[in-house]
Image (tube, rainbow, N blue to C red):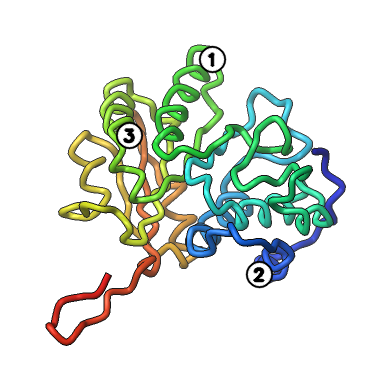
Amino acid sequence: MTSTAEQGYAYGDLPRLMGLMTGDEKHGPAATSTLDALWVLYDRVLRVGPERMDDPERDRFLLSKGHGPMAYYAVLAAKGFVDHRDLASFGAFHSALGLHPDRTLILGVEISSGSLGHGLPLAAGVALGLRARGLTDSRVFVLVGDAELDEGSNQEAIAFARGAGLDALHVVVVDNASSTYGWPGGVEARFAVEGWSVRRVSGRDHDALEAALTAPHPGRPHMVAAVVEPKYSPRPTSSGTPAR
């Protein structure tokens, strides 16, 4: 898919762009939980654009949390990667905008994501590959969900990235309390114990997200926990225990 999108969209336009996408498999909470982090990345942090996708020195963004990509597509449309007129075809048989992003069909999509737990290991490999090519100014950002970290592939990538000193690697964990097991000390504790640089901020505060994403972390990979409202809000039952 090539881009003919209009320019000049702002954050306030994103709900309207997301509203163009309809269907039964939207995974609404998964999309809306990522909206602010995605916007801050593309609007304030990433050195990337439709005209730079062939530039080897561009930043790379990998969406590991690939289910419910409506917010991702809306941001890509706002930034000129996707034609806003194509958003209405979301999920249709012949549409490039599938229920999971496809790197072969959509300008700006660096990986095809679907099965959870793949994005962080892939991002570690991309960061290592960029360093091997001498592209030391290119940064790698990957967005994952807190529940994804239950996958063992992520634990290996966390340990490897610190040992390899991949300071080009940045992980944004959208924490909406959907992890099966939970994370004592917060989701960032798993990264901190391996020696990562970590920050914890509100996933709705754009200034805090920008500051956390751009914080210096020489010699170490960096992780930002972007905390948003829980996907499922426990409510007390007659027995006093939360309902699931």
Distance between the alpha carbons at the discs numbered 3 and 2: 31 Å
* Secondary structure of residue under mark 2: helix
Mark 3 packing: few (<14 Cα in 10 Å), some, or many (20+)? many
Q: Is residue 89 above or below residue 64?
A: below
Q: Which residue is mark 2?
A: 15
* Secondary structure of residue under mark 1: loop
Please tell me the numbered disc located at residue 134. 1
Q: Is residue 58 left or right of residue 229?
A: right
Mark 2 packing: few (<14 Cα in 10 Å), some, or many (20+)? some
Please tell me the numbered disc located at residue 50. none
Q: Residue furthest bottom?
A: 238
* Secondary structure of residue under mark 3: helix
Q: Is residue 117 left or right of residue 10?
A: left
Position of the C terminus, as image quadrant, is bottom left
Residue 171: horizontal and vertical position, in percent?
41, 41
Three-letter residue code for mark 1:
Gly
Who comes first in sequence, dot 3 or dot 2?
2
- Pick the front one: 11 or 68: 68
Q: Is residue 223 above or below residue 21?
A: above
Task: Tell me the residue at 46%/30% (across/down).
Answer: 123
Three-letter residue code for mark 2:
Pro
Who comes first in sequence, dot 1 or dot 2?
2
Q: Which residue is mark 3?
A: 154
Residue 210: horizontal and vertical position, in percent?
49, 55
Residue 51: horizontal and vertical position, in percent?
78, 36
